[in-house]
Image (cartoon, rainbow, N blue to C red):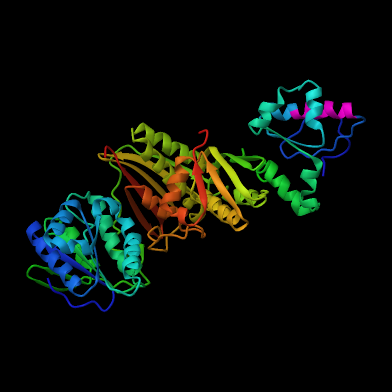
Amino acid sequence: VRDSGVLDVRAPLTTATHVCWVYDDPECFVDAAQRYLALGLARGQRLLCVGDGLADDLRAAGEPFGPLDPLVADGTLRFETVSDAYAVGDVLSPAGQWAFYDAAVHPHVHAPLDPPPFRIWFDGSRLVVEGSVDTFAADRLARVLETTPAPGGTTVLDLSRLEVADVACCRILAGWARSLDERGGELRIEGAPRSVLRIWGLLGLAGRAPVTFAEGPR
Amino acid sequence: MTAPAAAGARHEALFYRDDEEFVALVTAYLCEGLARDEALVAIEPRPHLDLLREALGRDAAAVHWLDMAEVGANPARLVPLWRDLVVEHGGSGRPVRGVGEPAYLGRRPAELVECEVHEALIDTAAQDLTPWRLLCPYDRRLPAAVQAGALRTHAAWHDALGGGPSPDHVPPGDGIDLATLPACTPLPPPTDVVLRGEFGLRDVPAVRRTVRAWARSCALPTEQVENLELAASELASNCIKHGGGSGSVAMWREPDAVVVEFSSPGRLTDPLAGRRRPDPLGEGGMGLYLVQQLCDLVQIRTGPAGTTVRVSTWAGC
């Protein structure tokens, strides 16, 4: 699962690189983590940190690559605890791990040479999609949505950063809305681009998928 | 006008010389349906719509009126509309009697061609529905080619003096093929400088952006730019999925239109593609339908050499 041997430098790391880093004490860990994360940030990548207390440790280290809160707020940086990431539902399974990783870093894992057509991240019950979802990316979106925790109640989907959405994208969103409805939840879409609203109306999706549309920060 | 009761679908052409003759013949046709307790639908351009309402007086309330210039602006939207109307009004088995004039005076030549394509397909498209009957008025002042097309696409014709079976009519069937449909004449070549490019899967986003930028440069309103971009996205995707993984896009201006054309090697085998209201939660069949709903005119030509979809957006409308 890693390149080979023991690595003692972080570079060169490429997209989809998987490395193992051995550290001696918590201080070394924070030092390695902050330098590794800073490298990704410099490349314009999103940062996913799975570990207990890492956010506090980075703050204690003086937020070496800038204030953390804005990065978390815009989806660039995401923290997950070990229990949340590795044992969703108290069960650790390869399928669950794949789904989690797919949702978290997708689509890098599938198309490492192409720029990702869309990014997606979670903020509690709020899901944010950014970029382009066309017919060639719609299945990826479907896979991500299928693995989205839906605790019930209202799930908010923020599309205010979605630049392109075609028929296939809307079909996926409608199907997900029906799935949430069947599980007792409901979907609220905020900031939908005009193309989504137009497609929704022309295809008669309003009568087939229970979705509430609302203005967003667009 | 009198005509035998329809035992099933019946699609007739009516030729008239002026508004007075039009009103007399169509009013008689609608009153006959009224006497038989049939459901009545009239899809006419605005001047005729008002004339018929006035002539029918209180009986006008029994008719479902629609403005052809609105609902049939793109003639390809009429097939799903007619199916919806027949289902809505004939759901209990009640016969539906309609009058619809897609090819009216003032239509652009390209629109009149697509009206004939529509007329050629509607029998096949609605043959599974409850008994319906549709009368299509044609003004004698329309080009001769349009009137000849009406005789090819309607089983019977009438005018003020009489009528009968159309000798050139080709009965619809399951084997209808856009490639051999007489109405699907070759598209005229561009009349202005053409921007052309080839694309593959990875170029689809670039195609979208290029069409959007070009539509903006033509000073189209924002909504038309967005519609064209959305249509381009669907058509480019269709080229990739059904055309062997690649396609070409061409863009040019006509005197009154902005035109975008997609071509790919694949052949379209379903003559009703884009003319059926799709199941929005089903698989496929939605892209071309959406394009038909978004764009002013869509012309599809297909054959062994491939498929071309030409989309026109009326400029300055």
Horizontally, residue B59 falls left or right of residue B77, namely left
At 13% across and 65% down in the image, what residue appears? B27
Tell me if residue A32 is in the magenta stretch. yes
Relative to B199, residue A43 above or below: above
Position of residue A102 measured from the top left corner of the image (x, y, whole percent): 69, 46
At 32% across and 47% down in the image, what residue appears? B296
Position of residue B57 measured from the top left corner of the image (x, y, whole percent): 13, 61
Q: Nearer the viewer, residue A155 or B122?
A: A155
The N terminus of chain A lies in quadrant: top right
- Residue A31 occupies quadrant: top right
Relative to B168, residue A158 above or below: above
Q: Could one spot residue B309 in this view of the protein?
A: no
Which region of the structure is painted magenta? Answer: A26-37
Residue situated furthest right in the rendering: A24
Relative to B282, residue A59 above or below: above
Q: Could one spot residue B300 in this view of the protein?
A: yes
